[in-house]
Image: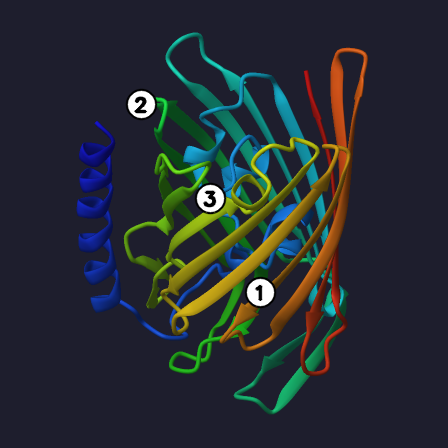
């Protein structure tokens, strides 16, 4: 049975790699806010999270990762992103009887006001409209995952994505007529798909996910595609190999290979050390990334009566002129 599942896993993996590589378009994607890492725990591990399970943040990385969650699990995330932008996200998972686990996800970008200038009379006149709060970006998703065997899980998610850059007044260059209330917005429906497989050696995991799969979109007269990401990874608790007799400490080490549509291939590595299942120390690194590199973070969790609560924090270095990025997460399970 194990060999059979592994063969199925590889057969699913290889066509995805070749199909995806043939359709890569560097720097040609829209709705790129979907590329921002979500969650303090995943980002602290350098985004090497496709193999992690039992965490509601798997909704944003690999929907198959929620298949083993047997409680109601709720997560809230906040990211202090670049140039005054903030990202907020939330997820919730719950069992659906013997059929599997369902989940809901929400993502919102909080963008600062921008300075608007209106140009008329063939560029000879311009009007200062001041600072306006006009950009709206969010995504809502519904996911479902099922543990097909004790070793193999599969999951998927459908997402409604909205992006609105506001309305504008402008002068048509051909007719010279003024056009008012031009809406610069679009919507998209996208899909995520993922699998997760326990190889049978200790807790060695293999996983793959495809995120933001959608047909080509049209924005006014221009066509664009969503930032499709193919991610494959492996993870293992090293202490289960080095110190198999003890149960007080764990050291999860993960390595992910990413093939994004709008950039060349990347490698992410991450580590997570747990002491007594109470305190975690995390670190990670992203290779071949234009801005991000090293990341680190901490986490604590505690059971309070019938509620299991946890708090996570991460810090990611950013190159260039931007400030480094901080993320916080808070979650409960009951």
* Percent coordinates x, y for residue 213 in the rendering: 33, 49
Secondary structure found at label 1? strand
Q: Is residue 313 visible?
A: no
Which mark sits nearer the N-terminus, 3 or 1? 3
The residue that disc 1 covers is: 168
| In the image: residue 219, left or right of residue 12 | right
Q: Residue at x 20, y 62 (%)?
A: 18
* Percent coordinates x, y for residue 122 in the rendering: 52, 88
The residue that disc 3 covers is: 51
Q: Quadrant of residue 25?
A: bottom left
Q: Quadrant of the C terminus?
A: top right
Q: Nearer the viewer, mark 2 or mark 1?
A: 2
State the count of labels: 3
Question: Any mark on residue 148, and which?
Answer: 2
* Percent coordinates x, y for residue 87 in the rendering: 67, 52
Would you place residue 156 above or below residue 16 in this image? above
Q: Residue at x 51, y 62 (%)?
A: 268
Count neighbours of disc 3 (C-alpha within 10 A) and say few if under 14, some if 14 to 19, many if 20 or more: many
Alpha carbon of mark 2 to alpha carbon of mark 1: how far? 51 Å
Alpha carbon of mark 3 to alpha carbon of mark 2: how far? 16 Å
Count neighbours of disc 1 (C-alpha within 10 A) and say few if under 14, some if 14 to 19, many if 20 or more: some
The figure's colour scheme reads rainbow
Would you place residue 158 above or below residue 31 in this image? above
Which mark sits nearer the N-terminus, 2 or 1? 2
Q: Quadrant of residue 47?
A: bottom right
306 or 210, which is in the foreground? 306
Which mark sits nearer the N-terminus, 3 or 2? 3
99 or 187, which is in the foreground? 99
| In the image: residue 211, left or right of residue 303 | left
Alpha carbon of mark 3 to alpha carbon of mark 1: how far? 44 Å
């Amino acid at each position: 049975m194990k060999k059979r599942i592994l063969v199925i896993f590889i057969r699913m993996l290889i066509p995805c790699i070749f199909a995806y590589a043939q359709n890569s378009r560097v720097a040609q994607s829209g709705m790129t806010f979907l590329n921002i890492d979500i969650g303090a725990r995943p980002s602290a591990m350098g985004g090497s999270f496709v193999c992690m399970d039992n965490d509601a943040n798997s909704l944003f990385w690999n929907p198959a990762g929620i298949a083993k969650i047997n409680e109601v699990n709720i997560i809230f995330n906040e990211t202090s992103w670049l140039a005054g932008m903030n990202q907020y996200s939330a997820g919730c998972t719950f069992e659906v009887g013997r059929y599997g686990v369902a989940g809901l996800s929400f993502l919102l970008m909080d963008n600062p006001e921008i300075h608007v200038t209106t140009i008329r009379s063939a560029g000879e006149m311009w009007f200062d409209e001041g600072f306006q709060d006009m950009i709206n970006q969010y995504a809502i998703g519904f996911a479902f995952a099922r543990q097909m065997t004790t070793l193999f899980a599969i999951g998927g998610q459908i997402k409604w994505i909205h992006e609105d850059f506001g309305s504008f007044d402008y002068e048509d260059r051909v007719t010279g007529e003024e056009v008012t209330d031009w809406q610069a917005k679009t919507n998209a429906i996208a899909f995520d798909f993922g699998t997760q497989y326990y190889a049978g050696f200790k807790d060695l995991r293999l996983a793959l996910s495809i995120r933001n799969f959608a047909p080509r979109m049209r924005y006014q007269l221009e066509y664009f595609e969503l930032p499709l990401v193919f991610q494959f990874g492996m993870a293992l608790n090293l202490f289960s190999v080095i110190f198999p007799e003890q149960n007080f400490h764990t050291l999860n080490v993960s390595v992910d290979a990413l093939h994004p549509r709008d950039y060349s291939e990347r490698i992410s590595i991450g580590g997570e050390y747990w002491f007594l299942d109470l305190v975690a120390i995390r670190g990670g690194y992203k290779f071949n990334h234009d801005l991000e590199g090293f990341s680190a973070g901490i986490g604590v969790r505690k059971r309070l009566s019938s509620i299991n609560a946890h708090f996570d924090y991460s810090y990611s270095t950013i190159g260039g002129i931007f400030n480094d990025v901080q993320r916080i997460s808070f979650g409960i399970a009951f």
